[in-house]
Amino acid sequence: MDNKQKPKQFHLYPNKLVEEVFHSTTEGIMITDEKKRISLVNSAFEKVTGYSMEEVRGNTPRILQSGKQGETFYKDMWNIIREKGVWRGEIWNKRKNGEIYPEVLTIASILNDNGEITNYFGVFTDISNEKVVEKELEELAVTDSLTNLSNRNSFNDLLTDLLQLSHDEKSQHAVLFIDLDRFKQINETLGNELGDMILIEVSNRISTIVREHDIFARYGGDEFLLTMSNVGHQKEAAHFAKDIIKLLNKPFYIDGNEIYITSSIGISIYPQDGIEVDQLVHKADKAMYFAKQNGRNQYAFYFDELKRDSKRLLVLEGELRKAIQKKEFIIHYQPKICITNGTIIGVEALVRWTNDKLGFVSPAEFIPHAEDTGLIIPLSEVIIEKVCLDIVEWRNKGIDKLQVSINIASLHFQQDDFLERINTIIGQYNCSPNQIELELTERTVMKDSEEVVTKLTKLKNLGFKISIDDFGTGYSSLSYLNRFPLNYLKIDSSFIKHIVSLKDKQAIVDSIILMAHRLHIKVVAEGVETKEQMKLLKEMGCDIIQGYYYSKPLPSTELLDFLELWEIHKQERNV
């Protein structure tokens, strides 16, 4: 500790109001003299650190140092303050009771009329709770919350690492795609809660025979993926698949019910069936469907005849190119409702495509293919044009304040001319950026943060609203979000689906809402399907909800009818 001397008196309060603000703010504030001796602290400082004004007056801020940052850190920090007058960052400090905690700290110097430093002031926020939630979200980003297995993202990353180490072509790995037969009927008959209990028991059973270095994950719904590393012969994978089928053929005794289920398993082999994760998973998936179509409750290896489906991909790409040129897509819109007053504050634009040769093509099929081939850029521009045309039509009918959110693909956003192109398109239709909300995934904004911040700031300055979509499914730091100029944060539907039944989902959603509000970001919950979910989200303070509870995605003409009926019956609704 530096020598404790009586600092110069610092007359902070010109009036009573300023004094009340100083002590009422939730951020901790510390004032020092030019020699960094503490002159004054506020009530929040005392609450967070545990030190009273009397205990710290005359000391330097070293009294708070945790030891987690070395002398070099502090030397660099003070050099920046001397050069620029201000420093901001995350730091670990220590409370009076010895507890170490993280905080976001801003330190600035105060100059007199001669340009001489007379004081320093520091403002900080305790982010302990944010760090806890951030850690939980990091775990959720790689863990399936229902079964505690690895999730899809984690499986892909782990298998990628394994394949990168498998330069020796003599190494063989097997990917098993496991799907429960007729599981949808169980959910519909016995309910989702009992279905979840079955999924947990399935994961527990298979886990008992998984080897130490194998990768086992819940891929989604009733699908599981398992990688057997370093198999000597394909027969090992076949025997393992048989063992899984036998395990799952045994009756499940759950909640007084005796339940029987079967499974179908598809197997692909590295390197003969592919050397990339997507190839191996795709081919194991194809083999699984072959097993299912040929009687279920069995396994099948991927084989050449299954490549016939690759012809559909060739047709799909050709037809997709033609559809983009001819702008054959239509846009459906799903309303977004203000949870407090029931006002429709906007809609999300969702693309639909029906083709003469292929029939209705799911967005889950053609959008990933567009991303893989680079067609997502012209496709996105067609979608934006279609949205602008609808906005013009709505405007002509007296609806001129409906905000439309548009999903922006990562590849599209990364283009150097993205700002110019989107501004040009909406300008052609005399649309205002204020009516457009751009939804980007969490992974997109975290790829190159400095460039992303610059681009997002320019977009926001133009008038566009900015939203992070599918929040919670990636790897972002919660305390990092304040770097981005965000208007909305959209909680992924996977959190909402079980929010009523699973306490961990409730805790995460509640924490996300609290933290977003702290950063002055509004929260949208997507995938809301039940009244119970809506009520719980309202209690948590969620701002906006979207989902089938209120409406499915609607074509423009049906949306206009919906808006009219909504206004008529809004007072009757229990929002």
Image: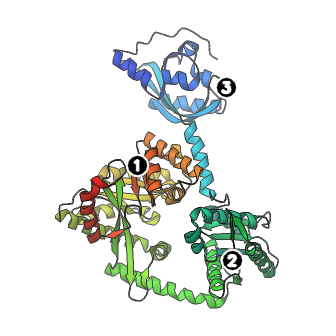
In the image, taking residue 525 as reference, residue 167 lies left or right, namely right
Residue type, mark 3 in image: Gly
Assess disc 1: are there few (<14), some (14-19) or many (≥20) residues with their C-alpha within 10 Å of its C-alpha: many
Q: What element carries label 1?
A: loop
Foreground mark, 3 or 2, reads 2
Which one is earlier in the sequence, the residue at label 1 or at label 3? 3
Foreground mark, 2 or 1, reads 2
Q: Is residue 90 above or below residue 174?
A: above
Residue type, mark 2 in image: Thr
Say whether marks 2 and 1 touch (CB < 8 Å).
Answer: no
Residue 130 visible at all: yes
Which one is earlier in the sequence, the residue at label 2 or at label 1? 2
Q: Badge 1 is on which residue?
A: 486
In the image, taking residue 103 as reference, residue 148 lies left or right, namely right
Q: Badge 2 is on which residue?
A: 262
Residue 98 got which mark?
3
